[in-house]
Image (tube, rainbow, N blue to C red):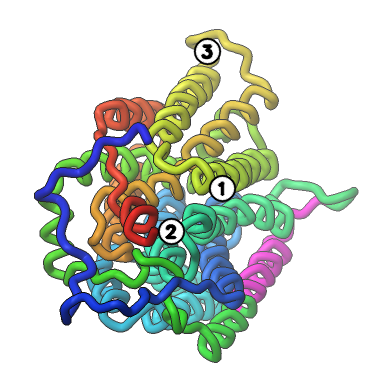
């Protein structure tokens, strides 16, 4: 399959019988129709977590006008997402010991509490800003489970020929939520000097009411999802769907040690976390980046929306392709990041039109930015599947928890730098371009293996 087998030192017995072999037949895997309901509930929570995280970037002009936010405040509001990832080891332990249900319920509770905190209509702007910051932090605390548990859910509930597709849906819906924030925010909340029809909105109270309406709507949707998960969200099906799902995994401590000592894993983890971390921070302040190019808040929202939506659609399509053509994950990623490097370079040079004299039109900005989103965002589920294949039998939740923590770490570092260097933002575009090229180089030298696929294909036969 074009892959190099893992070394003997990387393999461990997975299914060790407690008694001598008998003539009994092995228990065959079974899939349940309820798996799609479980996937839908998880995906909707991911959608809302992404929507809440990206609330303020697309309406930063209006938020500054109503709440007297500064550019630093907007960057910090986006940065609370990565900061909420700091206790990720606790969430990974909870997921490993108590199952997905307990971890997801705790995350949904944090989301509900955070959304409610943001929507308290205090008149004092000083305390109101602190409430909004606190709500964003609580929403960020849901990130470790929401962003890491997709591959665990797909392995636990789905057959091998559906795993990559389920992983793509579970991991990309959160990106779709942040994309809809680009659409919902500017359409629901008018800019201070913007117009709707023949009416010009200068009224600060009107803009504040529209923001409050968005915050109340998000609280209501999260509350409904929390109740649904509380009443029905099983951690696992009665019968596992595959041999890999039923196999014994490494302990929590052994898994962490295995991951940190595996150079191949660290190599591919950097190839994933650097570009995805940079593009998350970059997309969170896309409106600020495009303002010097005379792109309005609404147009910036549409550019951000289509770049993420394109990545989600293309990512699910590529994951479905990977389910049919197995053992080609590295090749798919190399092609994706070759395209991402070219698109990011095009966008960066287009924004420097005074130096490069390249045409800077709405069409070129749309096209280059959307291509960046398509290539990078669609790589996420392919990366997650490759991680699990590389380090199997480390549990999926722990593996993805480590790499998503690294991704959020790079997002946080980028946004932390933004709090100091926010007057001229072309350096953000260069960071995006450099991260794509860096990832492409690591992928070219990465040696892939497919231990979990080997178990399902050959052991189960």
Task: Report if residue 258 is visible in the image.
Answer: yes
Q: Nearer the viewer, mark 2 or mark 1?
A: 1
Residue 16's disc is none
**Quadrant in the rendering for residue 51:** bottom right
Residue where numbered disc 2 is placed? 77
Q: Nearer the viewer, mark 3 or mark 1?
A: 1
Crowd around label 3: few <14 · some 14–19 · many ≥20 (10 Å) = few
| Magenta residues (range) | 200-219
Horizontally, residue 17 falls left or right of residue 301, namely left
| Magenta highlight on residue 353 | no
**Quadrant in the rendering for residue 252:** bottom left
Q: Position of residue 372 (x, y in %)?
A: 52, 33
Give the CA separation, mark 2 to mark 1: 35 Å
Residue where numbered disc 3 is placed? 354
Decide which of 392, 378 is in the foreground and name it: 392
N-terminal of the pair, mark 3 or mark 1, is 1
N-terminal of the pair, mark 3 or mark 2, is 2
Crowd around label 1: few <14 · some 14–19 · many ≥20 (10 Å) = some
Give the CA separation, mark 3 to mark 1: 43 Å
Horizontally, residue 43 falls left or right of residue 425, namely right
């Amino acid at each position: 399959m074009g892959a190099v087998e893992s070394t003997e030192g990387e393999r461990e017995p997975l299914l060790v019988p407690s008694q001598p072999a008998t003539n009994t037949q092995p228990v065959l895997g079974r899939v349940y129709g309820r798996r799609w309901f479980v996937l839908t509930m998880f995906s909707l929570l991911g959608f809302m977590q992404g929507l809440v995280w990206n609330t303020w970037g697309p309406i930063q002009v209006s938020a500054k006008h109503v709440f007297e936010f500064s550019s630093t405040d907007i960057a910090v509001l986006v940065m609370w997402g990565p900061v909420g990832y700091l206790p990720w080891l606790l969430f990974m332990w909870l997921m490993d010991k108590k199952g997905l249900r307990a971890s997801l319920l705790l995350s949904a509770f944090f989301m509900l509490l955070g959304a409610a905190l943001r929507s308290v209509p205090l008149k004092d702007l000083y305390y109101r800003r602190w409430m909004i910051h606190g709500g964003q932090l609580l929403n960020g605390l849901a990130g470790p489970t929401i962003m890491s548990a997709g591959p665990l859910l797909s392995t636990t509930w789905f057959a091998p020929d559906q795993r990559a597709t389920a992983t793509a849906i579970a991991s990309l819906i959160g990106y779709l939520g942040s994309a809809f924030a680009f659409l919902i925010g500017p359409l629901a909340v008018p800019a201070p000097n913007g117009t709707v029809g023949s009416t010009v909105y200068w009224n600060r109270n009107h803009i504040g009411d529209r923001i409050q309406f968005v915050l109340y709507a998000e609280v209501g949707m999260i509350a409904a999802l929390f109740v649904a998960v509380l009443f029905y969200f099983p951690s696992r099906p009665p019968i596992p769907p595959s041999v890999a799902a039923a196999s014994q995994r490494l302990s929590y401590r052994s898994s962490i040690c295995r991951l940190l000592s595996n150079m191949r894993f660290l190599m591919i983890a950097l190839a994933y976390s650097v570009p995805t971390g940079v593009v998350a921070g970059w997309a969170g302040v896309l409106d600020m980046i495009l303002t010097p190019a005379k792109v309005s808040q609404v147009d910036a929202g549409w550019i951000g929306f289509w770049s993420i939506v394109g990545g989600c659609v293309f990512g699910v399509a590529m994951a479905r392709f990977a389910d049919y053509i197995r053992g080609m994950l590295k090749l798919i990623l190399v092609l994706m990041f070759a395209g991402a490097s070219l698109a990011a370079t095009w966008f960066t040079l287009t924004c420097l039109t005074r130096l490069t004299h390249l045409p800077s039109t709405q069409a070129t900005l749309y096209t280059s930015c959307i291509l960046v989103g398509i290539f990078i965002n669609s790589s996420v589920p392919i990366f997650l599947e490759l991680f699990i294949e590389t380090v199997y039998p480390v549990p999926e939740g722990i593996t993805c928890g480590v790499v998503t923590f690294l991704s959020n770490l790079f997002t946080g570092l980028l946004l932390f730098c933004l709090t100091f260097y926010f007057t001229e933002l072309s350096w953000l575009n260069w960071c995006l371009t450099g991260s794509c090229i860096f990832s492409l180089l690591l992928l070219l030298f990465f040696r892939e293996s497919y231990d979990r696929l080997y178990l399902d294909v050959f052991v189960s036969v």
